Image: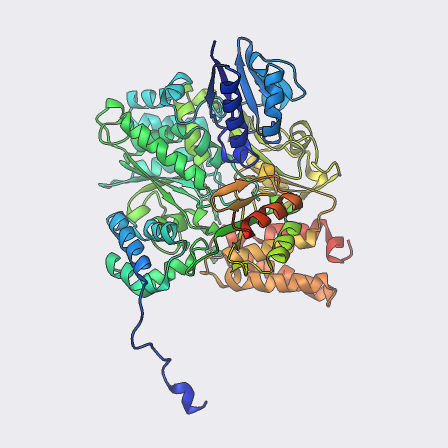
């Protein structure tokens, strides 16, 4: 009997040796005369267990991990193909608490399927959202997304339905859907996971968006730091096209949608939507003033919906299961699920998709299991490099856009980076200014030059040069950045700096 | 101000232009990309993928093909961190400098790499083996610290693993 064995091909799994594990399994199966079907799935995103090998058994998929290539022989000796006992055996994958406690909706197929296998996609609920969207009027599709309460997952949390309606209501011969896969925020990988692990769901989401607003062309802008995601996604586009899901007659509907992937070139600011549109047009990635909104005048001056990968990737499910199904998860104005990404100094790093509302403390204790170093948590940066450093005493805050904002934080794209008590918060503040200087698009003086001055002022404080006066100068500089910046790069770079200064003054050699 | 400084900068009478190899690569990239909407970025990527860099001497060719000014092409080329205008070493090593990797010891790894290679960022080791570049997040933050060597991602990098990697890169394997 042929046994199906899964070894992820996700680049994170490969980064810790998954290819060598897969090769060794294939070789030994051949040598020992075992009939196996080796599937290179996406990652379940339980990264501390990668490379995570799974074996299909009548009882379900059984996991072993983290597997090193040198351990594969012993797995065969222990009859892992029959689910045999071994020190790496983790039991049924679905019963691993980190996974079992989640509500995977957008990520329901991640790690389960062969990402590029169209049959696998269809067998796991793929294209159902598209079928329903084709049966509805465009206005009804927009209404459905609006009613679901879905807000943009790229950072700004703007209601997707309102953005789509604005674009749908704008009359133009040509409209565009642009997927923002620039994922520049440190501590985040939710976009990469979906691009590599379930690319057809994103294609389906873009198709639905196209139908809803009347756009016939789509672009996806993938950052150059993700070479494998770019390759996989291009292959997905080619296969979806051959299967009739892209082109002049989408799924036999007579409607057109063309899709192209473009590669970024290592500029954080190109994640900002107007800079991204400039970059897609072959120009410097410079931010421009809004209005006009991209939904009115975007790519090549035409009405354009710009949405994040996770936003668009959530759309198929909303259409397939209905707005109410999605809206019933979450609380307040944060509806549905949020893909949180545990990163930094955590024992168990990975993706946690949960309804909005669990607390940061639950996330850090029940899921992350504390720090990797075993030392106490000192600071948590939520929402990428422009997010504030949150101290221990706000960890009971619920994960919800408004609640996090109320404690001076920002949920952003859902990255959660943990630091233990060895962190030097003055060094982190300095880095925030250094990053702003490196990535500024150059349009606003406070951001372009003030950030470099900020590095210098922090250096003076740290070396004890006139610290009190320099602290005042730093706060003044931060106020200038907050007020005098066109976009959030300059406008929010003060958040990590000020939060470090306010919560950890001793690291700067300042009195509390 | 001395009168000497008023003389215009010397312009070589015969600009050597791109080498034959550079010329061929750029011409191929132009053919492949010129009809794409927003062709400049895909074109620059195609050139760098073929040569490892975008030769400054090819700017007039690219500008002419896309009906842009040389200044426009230069402006774009210099805006994006990904592009370089001189040949890299045999391998390009990008170390992640961002927060998640910092929380797991990347600052020490940076120091180690710089010391072992005897260079700072944006430089190539004397052996020609390794070009060192900074990068801000590789999307491997649950397996920090991370690095990218050529197009391959590595996670859970320890000082030992980094030293072994540097030895391999420097010895030409
Ligand atoms: C400096 C800066 C960087 C940004 N980076 C990203 C990014 O990497 N990915 C993303 O989806 N949105 C990013 N955004 C937000 C986008 O401007 C835009 O709001 C988003 O793509 C809209 O999609 P959404 O509504 O689905 O979130 C960034 C914004 C700023 C100001
Ligand atoms: S704040 Fe900085 S990145 Fe944003 S537009 Fe101004 S200069 Fe550009
Ligand atoms: S911060 Fe280093 S990989 Fe994300």
Visible residue check, residue A498: no
Q: Quadrant of residue A257?
A: top left
The colouring scheme, among rainbow, by chain, secondary structure or one colour, is rainbow
Q: Is residue B24 above or below residue B104?
A: below
Which residue is nearer to you in this view: A257 or A326?
Answer: A257
Q: Position of residue A305 (x, y in %)?
A: 36, 39
- Whether residue B101 is visible, yes or no, is yes
Q: Residue drawn 24% across and 24% down? A: A253
Answer with left or right where residue A151 lies relative to residue A296: right
Q: Quadrant of residue A45?
A: top right
Reply above or below: A230 against B102. Answer: above
Q: For residue B87, what is the image quadrant?
A: bottom left
Q: Looking at the picture, how far across and down is residue A402, in whole percent? A: 57, 37
Front-most of A423 and A372? A372
Residue A185's x, y, as percent? 53, 44
Residue most toward the front?
A31
Outermost residue on the right side: it is A511
Q: Which residue is pictured at 75% across the width and 38% down the height?
A: A376
Q: Nearer the viewer, residue B104 or A482?
A: B104
> What residue is shown at x 47% (from left), y 14% (from top)?
A35
Picture coordinates of residue A491 (x, y %)? Answer: 53, 53
């Amino acid at each position: 009997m042929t046994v199906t064995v899964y070894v992820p091909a996700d680049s994170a799994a490969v980064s810790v040796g998954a290819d060598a594990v897969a090769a060794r399994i294939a070789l030994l199966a051949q040598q020992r005369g075992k009939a196996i079907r080796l599937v290179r799935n996406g990652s379940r995103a339980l990264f501390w267990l990668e490379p995570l090998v799974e074996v299909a058994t009548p009882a379900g998929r059984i996991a072993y991990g983290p597997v090193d290539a040198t351990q594969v022989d012993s797995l065969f000796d222990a009859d892992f193909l029959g689910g045999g006992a071994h020190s790496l055996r983790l039991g049924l994958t679905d019963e691993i608490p980190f996974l079992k406690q989640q509500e995977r909706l957008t990520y329901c197929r991640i790690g389960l399927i062969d990402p590029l296998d169209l049959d696998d996609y269809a067998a796991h609920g793929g294209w159902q959202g598209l079928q329903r969207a084709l049966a509805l009027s465009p206005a009804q599709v927009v209404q459905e997304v609006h009613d679901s309460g879905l807000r943009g997952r790229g950072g700004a949390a703007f209601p997707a339905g309102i953005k789509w309606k604005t674009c749908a209501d704008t009359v133009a011969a040509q409209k565009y859907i642009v997927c923002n896969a620039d994922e520049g925020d440190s501590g985040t990988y939710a976009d990469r996971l979906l691009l590599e692990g379930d690319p057809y769901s994103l294609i389906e989401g873009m198709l639905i968006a196209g139908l809803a607003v009347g756009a016939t062309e789509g672009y996806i802008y993938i950052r150059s730091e993700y070479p494998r995601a770019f390759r996989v996604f291009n292959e997905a586009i080619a296969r979806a096209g051959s299967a009739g899901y892209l082109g002049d007659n989408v799924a036999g509907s007579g409607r057109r949608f063309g899709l192209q992937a473009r590669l970024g070139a290592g500029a954080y600011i190109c994640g900002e939507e107007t800079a991204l549109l400039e970059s897609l047009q072959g120009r410097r990635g410079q931010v421009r003033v809004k209005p006009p909104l991209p939904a009115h005048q975007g790519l090549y001056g035409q009405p354009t919906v710009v949405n994040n990968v996770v936003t668009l990737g959530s759309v198929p499910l909303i259409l397939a299961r209905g707005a109410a199904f999605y809206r019933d998860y979450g609380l307040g104005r944060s509806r549905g699920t949020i893909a949180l990404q545990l990163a930094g100094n955590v024992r168990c790093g990975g993706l946690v998709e949960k309804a909005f509302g669990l607390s940061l403390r639950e996330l850090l204790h029940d899921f992350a299991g504390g720090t990797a170093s075993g030392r106490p948590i000192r600071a948590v940066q939520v929402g990428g490099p422009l997010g504030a450093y949150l101290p221990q005493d706000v960890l009971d805050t619920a994960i919800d856009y408004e609640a996090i904002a109320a404690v001076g934080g920002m949920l952003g794209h859902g990255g959660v980076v943990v630091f233990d008590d060895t962190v030097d918060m003055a060094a982190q503040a300095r880095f925030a200014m250094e990053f702003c200087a490196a990535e500024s698009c150059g349009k606003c003086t406070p951001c372009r030059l003030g950030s470099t001055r900020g590095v210098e002022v922090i250096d003076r404080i740290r070396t004890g040069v006139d610290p009190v006066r320099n602290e005042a100068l730093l706060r003044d500089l931060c106020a200038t950045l907050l007020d005098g910046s066109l976009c959030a790069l300059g406008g929010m770079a003060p958040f990590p700096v000020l939060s470090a200064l306010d919560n950890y003054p001793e690291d700067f050699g300042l009195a509390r | 101000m001395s009168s000497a400084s008023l003389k215009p900068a010397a312009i070589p009478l015969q600009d050597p232009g791109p080498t034959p190899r550079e010329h061929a690569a750029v011409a191929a990239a132009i053919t492949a990309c010129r009809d794409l909407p927003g062709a400049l970025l895909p074109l620059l990527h195609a050139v760098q993928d073929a040569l490892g860099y975008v030769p400054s001497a090819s700017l007039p060719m690219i500008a002419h093909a896309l009906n842009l000014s040389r200044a426009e092409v230069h402006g774009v080329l210099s805006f994006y961190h990904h592009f370089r205008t001189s040949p890299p070493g045999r391998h390009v090593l990008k170390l992640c400098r961002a927060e998640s990797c910092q929380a797991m010891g990347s600052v020490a790894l940076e120091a180690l790499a710089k010391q072992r290679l005897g260079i700072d960022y944006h430089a190539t080791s004397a052996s020609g083996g390794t070009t060192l570049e900074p990068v801000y997040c590789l999307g491997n933050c649950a397996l920090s610290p991370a690095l990218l060597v050529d197009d391959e991602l590595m996670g859970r990098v320890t000082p030992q693993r980094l030293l072994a990697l540097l030895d391999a890169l420097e010895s030409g394997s």
